[in-house]
Image (cartoon, rainbow, N blue to C red):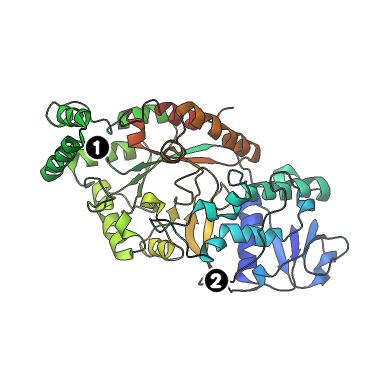
C-alpha cells in the first residue's frame, strides 16, 4: 500500500494517481489530506506538499493539479536531461508532468495548426527537447517501481506485469488501387494519367480492370500469412468519396469478402472516419453504421484519417458515436511518442475537467512518416526504428505501429517495404 499525502484533492490529481499506481503499477494507494495516517502500516508515504516531511518521499507540487483552469505555463515539464535522469534528480513536479503530457495540455495552448488542422510535432515540448522518440512517462513509472523495490521493500511480484510486444495496426484507405472503382472514376483516372504522361499507370489499371491481373492493393492474403498468429487492428475508411477519401464502399461484395476473412482470422475491425467527418458525430455515426452493416460487428475502435483531430471536439464526437478506443495519438510526419508514453490511457477532457470513458492507444512508427516525409530508404527506416524498439523492450512497453495496404503493394514507389512490416512484427531481440 502507498499512502499519498496531499493537502488537497482534485480530479486531475486522482486521474494521475489512478494511472500511475492502479493502471500502470497495479498497486493500491490511499490519498489522504491528513498527515496522521503516516504512522499507519503503509510501506511508503509519498508527500505531495510544499512542506517536506521526515520519513516520506517528498515531491513539491507546482499547482497544475490543484486547478481546473487551462492557462499558459512556463514549465517544459521535462527535466534537463529527460532520458538519463532519475526520479531523485527531478527538479519539477513529476505528477504534473505526467498530467501535462497525457492530457495533451500543450495542444490547448496554441491555435497554430497545419493545413489539415493538426497540431504540429514541431510545436511539441518533447520534440523541442529532442526526446520525442523516448517515452518519458514510461521511464518515470519504471523508476517509481524500481525505487519502491530498492528503497521501500516492495517485491517485484507486487507489481502489474508489463511486457514488450509489437502491435500491428493497418489503415485501409483504398482497398483496391484500380479494381471495383465506379466507371466515372476509372475514366477520370485514365484521363488524368494520360494528360500527365503516366503511361505505366494506364497499363497497370487496364491490366487489372480488363485483364484480370491481381490488384496491387489487394495483398490481404500476404498480410494474413505475414501476421501468422499475431492479431492486428484494421481501420476501414467507409465514408463517401471526396478529395481525401478514395475508398469504395465496404458494402461492395469484394470488400465485404476481405473484411470477413480478416475478422474470421481473429483481427479487429475499426473505423477510419473520413477526412470530412472530423468532429462531426452525425457523419461518424453514418460511417460507423455502414461498416457495422458490412461486417455484422459492433465497431468500438477508430483512428482518424490523416490523423486529423482537434481537442476536445474530435474525442467528444467519438465518444458520442460509441467509440471506446482511439488509435490516433501520434504524428504523421515523424516517429515518436506524442503523449510521452507507449501505453494506453484514458482521455482526460480538460474543458470538462474530468476523465472520460475513451481509451487512447498511442502509436510510435508509421510507414508514411518514414518514406514520404522523412524520405528514408527501407534500410534507413529499419535502422531508425530499431532504436525505438530497443528502448521499448528495456521499458517493457508495447511497440504499436501503422501500415497501409498500399505500402505493402510494392507499387507506386513502395518496393521492398514488406521488409519493414515483417521487421516491425518481430517481437524477438
Q: Is residue 292 left or right of residue 1?
A: left
Q: Is residue 108 left or right of residue 268?
A: right
Q: Is residue 226 above or below residue 257?
A: above
Q: Tag 1, which secondary structure?
A: loop
Return the residue at label 1: 176
Residue 283, x across and y down, in percent: 28, 61
Residue at image position (40%, 29%) is 417
The answer to whether the residue labelled 2 contacts the one labelled 1, judged by CB atoms less than 8 Å apart, is no
CA gap between label 2 and label 1 equals 43 Å
Q: Tag 2, which secondary structure?
A: loop
Quadrant location of the C terminus in the rendered image: top right
Q: Is residue 329 left or right of residue 429?
A: left
Name, please, the residue furthest toward the right: 54
Q: Is residue 241 above or below residue 277?
A: above
Residue at image position (22%, 51%) is 241
Return the residue at label 2: 353
Can residue 181 be seen here? The reply is no
Residue 45, x across and y down, in percent: 79, 61
Classify residue 284 by image quadrant: bottom left
Residue at image position (32%, 54%) is 275
Residue 103, x across and y down, in percent: 55, 61
Amino acid at each position: 500500500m502507498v499512502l499519498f499525502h496531499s493537502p488537497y484533492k482534485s480530479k486531475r490529481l486522482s486521474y494521475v494517481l489512478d494511472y500511475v499506481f492502479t493502471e500502470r503499477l497495479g498497486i493500491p494507494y490511499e490519498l489522504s489530506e491528513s498527515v496522521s495516517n503516516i504512522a499507519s502500516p503503509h510501506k511508503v508515504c509519498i508527500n505531495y506538499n510544499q512542506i517536506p516531511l521526515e520519513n516520506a518521499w517528498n515531491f513539491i507540487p507546482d499547482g497544475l493539479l490543484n486547478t481546473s483552469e487551462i492557462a499558459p505555463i512556463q514549465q517544459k515539464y521535462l527535466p534537463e536531461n529527460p532520458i538519463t535522469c532519475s526520479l531523485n534528480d527531478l527538479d519539477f513536479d513529476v505528477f504534473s508532468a505526467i498530467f501535462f503530457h497525457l492530457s495533451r495540455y500543450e495542444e490547448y495552448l496554441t491555435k497554430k495548426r497545419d493545413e489539415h488542422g493538426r497540431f504540429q510535432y514541431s510545436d511539441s515540448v518533447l520534440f523541442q527537447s529532442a526526446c520525442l522518440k523516448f517515452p518519458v512517462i514510461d521511464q518515470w513509472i519504471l523508476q517509481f517501481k524500481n525505487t519502491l523495490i530498492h528503497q521501500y521493500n516492495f517485491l517485484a511480484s507486487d507489481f502489474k506485469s508489463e511486457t514488450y510486444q509489437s502491435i500491428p495496426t493497418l489503415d485501409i484507405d483504398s482497398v483496391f488501387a484500380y479494381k471495383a472503382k465506379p466507371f466515372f472514376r476509372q475514366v477520370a483516372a485514365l484521363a488524368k494519367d494520360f494528360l500527365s504522361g503516366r503511361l505505366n499507370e494506364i497499363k497497370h489499371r487496364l491490366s487489372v480492370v480488363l485483364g484480370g491481373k491481381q490488384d496491387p492493393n489487394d495483398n490481404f492474403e500476404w498480410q494474413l500469412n505475414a501476421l501468422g498468429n499475431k492479431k492486428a487492428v484494421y481501420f476501414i475508411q467507409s465514408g463517401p468519396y471526396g478529395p481525401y477519401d478514395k475508398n469504395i464502399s465496404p458494402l461492395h461484395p469484394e470488400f465485404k469478402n476481405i473484411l470477413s476473412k480478416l475478422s474470421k482470422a481473429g483481427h479487429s475491425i475499426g473505423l477510419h472516419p473520413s477526412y470530412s467527418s472530423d468532429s462531426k458525430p452525425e457523419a461518424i455515426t453514418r460511417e460507423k453504421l455502414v461498416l457495422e452493416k458490412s461486417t455484422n460487428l459492433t465497431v468500438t475502435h477508430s483512428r482518424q484519417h490523416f490523423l486529423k483531430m482537434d481537442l476536445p471536439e474530435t474525442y467528444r464526437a467519438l465518444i458520442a458515436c460509441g467509440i471506446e478506443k482511439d488509435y490516433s495519438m501520434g504524428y504523421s510526419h515523424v516517429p515518436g511518442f506524442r503523449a510521452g508514453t507507449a501505453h494506453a490511457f484514458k482521455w482526460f477532457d480538460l474543458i470538462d475537467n474530468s476523465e472520460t470513458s475513451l481509451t487512447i492507444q498511442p502509436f510510435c512508427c508509421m510507414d508514411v512518416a518514414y518514406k514520404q516525409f522523412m524520405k528514408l530508404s527501407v534500410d534507413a527506416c529499419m535502422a531508425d526504428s530499431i532504436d525505438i524498439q530497443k528502448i521499448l523492450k528495456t521499458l517493457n512497453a508495447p511497440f504499436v505501429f501503422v501500415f497501409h495496404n498500399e505500402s505493402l503493394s510494392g507499387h507506386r514507389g513502395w518496393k521492398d517495404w514488406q521488409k519493414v512490416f515483417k521487421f516491425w512484427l518481430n517481437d524477438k531481440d
